Amino acid sequence: MKPAQTVIEPLLTRLRGLPRAAVIGAGVVLLAGAAWLVMGGGASDARPTITQKVVIGDVEDTVTAVGKLQPLQFVDVGTQVSGQLKKLHVTYGAQVEQGQLLAEIDPTIYQARVNAGEAQLLNLQAQLSQRQAERTLAEQQLGRQTALLAEKATSQDAFDAATSTRKVNAAQIAALEAQIKQANSTLSADRANLGYTSIYAPMSGVVVDVIAKQGQTLNANQAAPLVVRIADLATMTVYAQVSEADVPKLKPGMTAYFTTLGQAGRKRYGKLRQIIPTPEVVNNVVLYNALFDVENPDQDLFTQMSAQVFFVIGEAKSVPIVPITALRRAAPPPEKAGERPARGGRSYVVRVKDGLGTTDKPVQVGVMNRLVAEIKTGLSVGDEIVIDAPTPAAGQSDQGRGGMGRGPRI
């Protein structure tokens, strides 16, 4: 387009010498034309066409989520008895083996109860020995009275007294035996409580948290106080929070991977194990925890680490791909408008540039995401496609462009 000045100046030269009325009329026309030129009325409304070639690449369709890491196996070690935490033998990060001594609670009270129980048991056993000796005497006396009564050498009262003494002695022995059984039971409980003052590791692992402090008084009467948490860091579980809209896309066994903030370039893979059916509601957003496990041989994954999680819905490697903006919806034939897309892929139209201009080609699309799409049929590697077509003139509808929209909705 020529600048307005180059158009107007030659016209002014020709107007010299004409009648005044003609000059005024021509000036009005020139001013209107200049305004039209300045406003861009003479410019073409066509934008340059942007093209790109079909290339080989990878495409992955995923559901993303944010997650936290937790050990697959961990246990909170608490105490079953109350008392002062006398000695704590471990600290954060300590590697412990199953059965290793972790902590000790002051055993003074529990040792005293055991001692008292043992003394009481000894007393009852002595009483039992006494009653057993008395039983022997009572049985001898009853035997003599029985023999004498048969010969009518003793009275019936003497015989009855001997019989009664024998029965009373038997009852006393039975009562002492019951008391000894009860004392043994109490002593066993006291000995168990004394044993609970020494806290041992129920599993091998790493001490990931220390809840109680040495010298702290622990009260086990209402709830079991926690002392330490032991975890096996060899296998970690990812708890990924997935929105309720994406949960139907997930299936147990599908591939999942994640990255951490400290190692954004390293992907760690696993298989979706389960989806916890009870959701968490955060700011009126319903989220479900999806769990999968990953190996941690380097011990560089820790509890509560943040993870950017990806669940792989579909993927294709080393296939022809095109930008998603190059795809246009294909208008289905009238007689097949109600049918579902073919199983080989979804149908779209792509504009391909050739020597004569552009040609619309139907294509079958496989895996696609928000950026690129896999081309299954219809294009070849190296084909030059239009990815940014000119904007249609005002009032032009989709029907005027062959029934094709701007692009697919993902």
Image: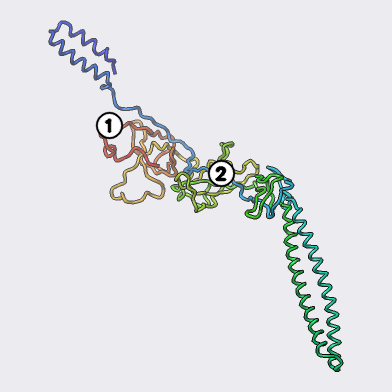
Residues 95 and 377: in front is: 95
Q: Secondary structure at mark 1?
A: loop
Label 1 is placed on what type of residue?
Ala
Give residue 243's position: percent from left, percent from top.
46, 46
Alpha-carbon neighbours of circle 1 within 10 Å: few (<14), some, or many (≥20)?
few
Residues 406 and 136: in front is: 136
Looking at the image, residue 261 sits to the left or right of residue 219; the answer is left
Looking at the image, residue 348 sits to the left or right of residue 318; the answer is left
Q: Which residue is at 73% across, 64% downward?
A: 186
Q: Quadrant of the N terminus?
A: top left
Asked if residue 346 is positioned above or below residue 188 in the image, the reply reads above
Residues 124 and 65: in front is: 124
For the residues labelled 2 and 1, the Cα–Cα distance comes to 51 Å
Q: Which residue is at 81% across, 90% downward?
A: 156
Give residue 361's position: percent from left, percent from top.
35, 39
**Which residue ends up furthest to the top in the rendered image?**
17
**Which residue ends up furthest to the bottom in the rendered image?**
151
Give residue 134's position: percent from left, percent from top.
84, 77
Asked if residue 192 is positioned above or below residue 77 in the image, the reply reads below
Asked if residue 165 is positioned above or below residue 217 in the image, the reply reads below
Please name the residue that numbered disc 1 is placed on.
393
Please name the residue that numbered disc 2 is placed on.
68
Label 2 is placed on what type of residue?
Lys
Give the foreground label among 2 and 1.
2
Q: Quadrant of the C terminus?
A: top left
Label 2 close to label 1 by CB (< 8 Å):
no
